[in-house]
Amino acid sequence: MKNFILLVFIGSLFLFVGCNNVVQHKSISQIEPSLGPENGRLLIIGGAARDPLFLEIFKEYAGGADAKIIVIPTAYEDKQIEKDTGFVRLKSTFERAGFSNIHILHTRDSNIANTEEFVAPIREANGVYFMGGRQWRIADGFLNTLAHDEFNKLLARGGIIAGSSAGATIQGSYLARGDTKKNTIMLGDHEVGLGFMKNVAIDQHILARNRQFDLFEILDQHPQLLGIGLDENTGILVDHDKFEVVGKHYVAILDGTRWSRERDTIYQLSANSREFYFLKSGDKYDLQNRKVLVENQSN
């Protein structure tokens, strides 16, 4: 009788462990999809955006050189703002790229971002560009404000929101490196981004700073998220539920799978895996179904 009870207990234990494994190893179809905006586009750049390609893309989707654009330097360090108090040098960067109707919008006070006067320029614009720095400063100034609503309305009318470095990470729903103490803390005291991309955590400077494994710290705690790591001078152009890689280097995809370019095969990974794969310029990705879109494969 004792042996029978022991066997029943061991069988129940294996069943319990097996059930847990089923929960931990969800298939892609069971995960809430990641999505871009229903209308408009996002240009998300991994920092050091030296290639003129990025501002050319931004210009195209904002409506051309005469389009009204908003540039937001709120993520800047204080010393950067002190050196360019009137944002003359910042504005000249966009003027050299051919833009003629530029409005600099800056605040770290959410009360100001909730005023009609402050948001009025956003309502007339068709493009917003978030500069780099520390992403939590953007969250402090704009998250859940009237300005935040107007950014979403700008996308709804077909505009574009772009950003580099901190201006990239802020566009995700989860705010990676959002800690006010230092930027090496992945799960910080600010964890909510502006959410232009849903169910996504975005990191930047990944290869230049050897950060390619850091997103796993977030995914261990939030396995439902899609991890996107962008190298410098490299970005993604997001159109609804798909994106295309643009720029010089690579984008790391942490989606619970490993994709083989040569074999065009997707391998499902175990829950504790530390594998990911890279996409390069021209590669396309389906956010909703979390898979690479292959059109033409070269030998």
Image (cartoon, rainbow, N blue to C red):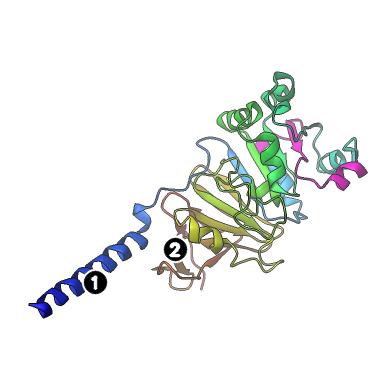
- The residue drawn where x is 51% and y is 74% is 299
Measured along the vertical axis of the image, is residue 269 above or below residue 184?
below
Query: In the rendered structure, which disc, 1 or 2, sits on the residue that comes first in sequence?
Result: 1
Mark 1: which secondary structure?
A: helix
Residue 77 inside the magenta-drawn segment: yes
- Going by the image, does 18 lie left or right of 279? left
Mark 2: which secondary structure?
A: loop
Cα separation, mark 1 vs mark 2, equals 25 Å
Q: Residues within 10 Å of mark 1 (few under 14, many from 20)?
A: few
Residue 256's disc number: 2
Q: Quadrant of residue 186?
A: bottom right
User: What's the residue type where badge 2 is placed?
Assistant: Gly
Report the residue that reaches farthest toward the front. Answer: 2
Q: Are marks 1 and 2 in contact (CB under 8 Å)?
A: no
Report the residue that reaches farthest toward the left. Answer: 1
**Label 1: which residue?**
14
User: What's the residue type where badge 1 is placed?
Assistant: Phe
Residue 245 inside the magenta-drawn segment: no
Residue 57's disc number: none
Start and end of the magenta stretch?
59-84
Image quarter (top left, top right, bottom left or bottom right) of the N terminus? bottom left
Number of marks in picture: 2
Res 57 seen here: no
Q: Position of residue 30 (x, y in %)?
A: 34, 53
- The residue drawn where x is 53% and y is 57% is 227
Measured along the vertical axis of the image, is residue 6 above or below residue 55?
below
Q: In terms of depth relative to the viewer, which is nearer, 181 or 42?
A: 181
